[in-house]
Amino acid sequence: MQGPGGNTGFRAALSWLDMPPLWLLLFIALARVQAVRFPELAWKHPASDLAGGLLVGAGLLLFALAVMEFSRARTTIVPHREARSLITTGIYTRSRNPIYLGDLLILAGLCAFWGVWLALAVLVPLFAWLVTDRFIRPEEARLAARFGPEWEAWAARVRRWV
């Protein structure tokens, strides 16, 4: 079916591809390419295994805590959809974006585990910028429009990342 701006079916398919988990997988793959194809750029240390494991574990924990809050609130976790409720409880009293923060921790943890410090220094900030620009800002605009003063009060209390 085609709308006035072009093929809406194609756009819908692209919106499903433009999802944070897929971006995370792409960035993880890029870090892994550095680890495998350019091992001379990697620097492994016994502490990097521990640091990597702790970061990945913390990221998974943040993700799980956030998903529990979404389940309690019975609202969508899909970034491109309209939220039915504003989640301000649980982990959302500490961060407005614990899932994206968890994604960053997972990416950083894998970079540390593989010893790819160049990827850590480049990919993690690039991923943070990408999710902020592509997902967080539009989500915040939708939440502000829908929940108004409630969102404004929560956003004033809780930082975007940490």
Image (cartoon, rainbow, N blue to C red):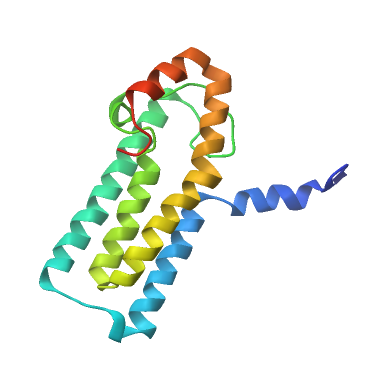
**Nearer to us in this view, 15 or 117:** 117
Name of the residue lying farthest toward the top: 149
Q: Which of the two residues, 41 or 6, is positioned nearer the viewer here?
A: 41
Of 24 and 74, nearer the camera is 24
User: Is residue 83 something that shows in the picture?
Assistant: no
Q: Position of residue 9 (x, y in %)?
A: 77, 49
Q: Horizontal and vertical percent for residue 121?
A: 33, 64
State the image quarter where residue 25 is shown. Answer: bottom left
Quadrant housing residue 106: bottom left
Decide if residue 9 is in sight here. Answer: yes
Residue 158, above or below 56:
above
Q: Outermost residue toward the left?
A: 46
The residue depicted at 35 percent of the width and 39 percent of the height is 161
Judge from the rendering whether residue 5 lies leftward or rightward of residue 36; answer left or right: right
Q: Measuring 26% from the left and 44% from the top, which residue is drawn there?
A: 61
Above or below 61: residue 40: below
Q: Quadrant of the C terminus?
A: top left
Where in the figure is residue 21, as x and y percent of width and height? Answer: 47, 53
Q: Residue at x 19, y 76 (%)?
A: 44
Total residue callouts: 0
Residue at position x 37%, y 58% in the image: 124
Q: Position of residue 16 (x, y in %)?
A: 61, 50
